[in-house]
Amino acid sequence: MFWNREQELTFLNREYHTPGGRFVVIYGRRRVGKTRLIAEFIRDKPGFYHLADASSDLMQRRTFRDSLRTFLGPEAWMLDDDTVPAWPTLLRYLTTMASDESRLVIALDEFQYLVQSEPAFPSLLQKLWDTEWERRNLLLILCGSHEGMVHDAVLSYDSPLYGRRTGQIRLQPFSFSDYWRVFDQLSFNAAVENYTVSGGVPRYITALGLDSDLWDRVRTQILNPNAVLYDEPRFVLSAERADALSYFAILRTIAGGEHRRSRIAASLGQPASQLAPYLERLIELALLERRVPITRPDSSRLGLYYLADPFFRFWFRFVLPNQSAIELRQVDPVLARIQTSFGAHVSLQFEDCCANWLYDQATIGRLPFTLDRVGRWWNRAGGTDEIDVLGVNEETGDAVFGECKWSRQPIGMDTLTSLYGRAQRMPWRKDNRREWFVLFSRSGFQEPLLERARRQGNVGYHDILLVHDGHVFGGPDQ
């Protein structure tokens, strides 16, 4: 299936229908669906697609020649012998296929491998673009999963191709709201649980599936040495980095609960200053994220590091520590241990899902406020105050304070009272902001809290929304 890439397809189609040569770069982490996006885009268009691999320059040119033979068909008579032309010759064979009557898409996938085998490849493309392709009726797509190399080879100021592109797409995993829109047969709570395991990477969503109970799928698709997801993080890191073990150790430490750079470094026995390049690289690979309080986007002192991908979080917490037992086919006790502590694990992901839901619903006008940014807030310097979800509107000063409870018990007035107190200690635009309070509950709300929400709007009361399983209670119109 092809899911929810309407924006990207709209952009590519606009580029396709713009006269003259167009040049788009598509990049993003592995498994995120870049190749599938290209395939969907060119399925009804004249298009040459070539997938590069990690091989020598001679082998790259040979497979490219074979791709040309397939694409050109009877016109490939000049490629019938066993010679392997140089890159300029191979690329120029495509030039004549773009005419005023027939627009051509040229898609070079895993572009980083072409650069690895022939470092001059960007210069060759630049010369061909400047002298011929820019004026031809074609759309060139360069696609890569090694974000650093794609940036250096195409996007950076020092690249020969700098300034030639007419657009770029950094393809991202699906957000929770994207996921729930696609799989709307799930309840909100069920979507949270499934997303906590698979995350938003299409390859992982497909592998985990939705055809049976979640724990049956975890058993067969993750806790199985023959399953594609069983060792996926190791494969991803080894494909991206020669020194994968160092990166693996960092991710393992952060997944284990260390989020400050100094603490991560201490756990690894390294100076914090030496850790910075590794952390930056993992962020570039979209495997790690650095979070700061939502009201302090420029704060370095309060920055915390978290695994960016929910599946990686699940794998490092539950699969990696149990792989010896899994290899010995002791899956039942492993699964029982995962189920015992899964609720605590989901509670952290629940906050992210609620924040994403809140921003999405406010953006499309389904809530009585608009938000510019949504995230977490904490103030370690002044104490231990934390707010699970904080949304702010820069223009109006409105602030939305949210508390998320992944508990089997309905939540009551004490949760709201505690949130009031922390909100008053949060200093952002305190004098002129309008305040909203949103409580997210897995299991609903106690009657006094429901009654409190019914009486809002009276003098002295704040505006309150109660959200249970994706359904909203409260607000001026409810």
Image: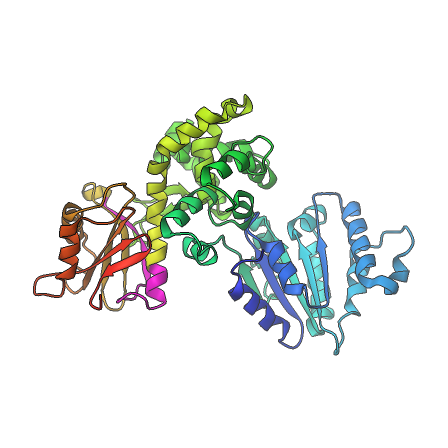
Give the image location of residue 174, x and y in percent.
47, 54
Point out the residue furthest to the left here: 459
Q: Residue at x 41, y 49 (%)?
A: 191
What is the quadrant of residue 100 in the picture? bottom right
Give the image location of residue 102, x and y in percent.
74, 74
Residue 368 painted magenta: yes
Q: Is residue 259 left or right of residue 218?
A: left
Residue 308 seen: no
What is the quadrant of residue 26 in the picture? bottom right
Q: Is residue 199 left or right of residue 134?
A: left
Count of numbered marks: 0
Residue 252 painted magenta: no
Reply above or below: 389 against 335: below
Reply above or below: 182 against 383: below
Give the image location of residue 248, x and y in percent.
50, 33
Quadrant containing the C terminus in the rendered view: bottom left
State which region is magenta.
Answer: 359-379
Q: Residue at x 50, y 39 (%)?
A: 217
Q: Residue at x 78, y 65 (%)?
A: 94
Q: Nearer the viewer, residue 285 or 353?
A: 353
Quadrant containing the N terminus in the rendered view: bottom right
Point out the residue furthest to the right here: 81
Q: Nearer the viewer, residue 223 or 146?
A: 223
Residue 18 seen: yes
Reply above or below: 285 against 47: above
Tell me, what colour scheme is on the image? rainbow
Q: Residue at x 16, y 58 (%)?
A: 453
Reply above or below: 65 against 245: below
Give the image location of residue 6, x and y in percent.
53, 65
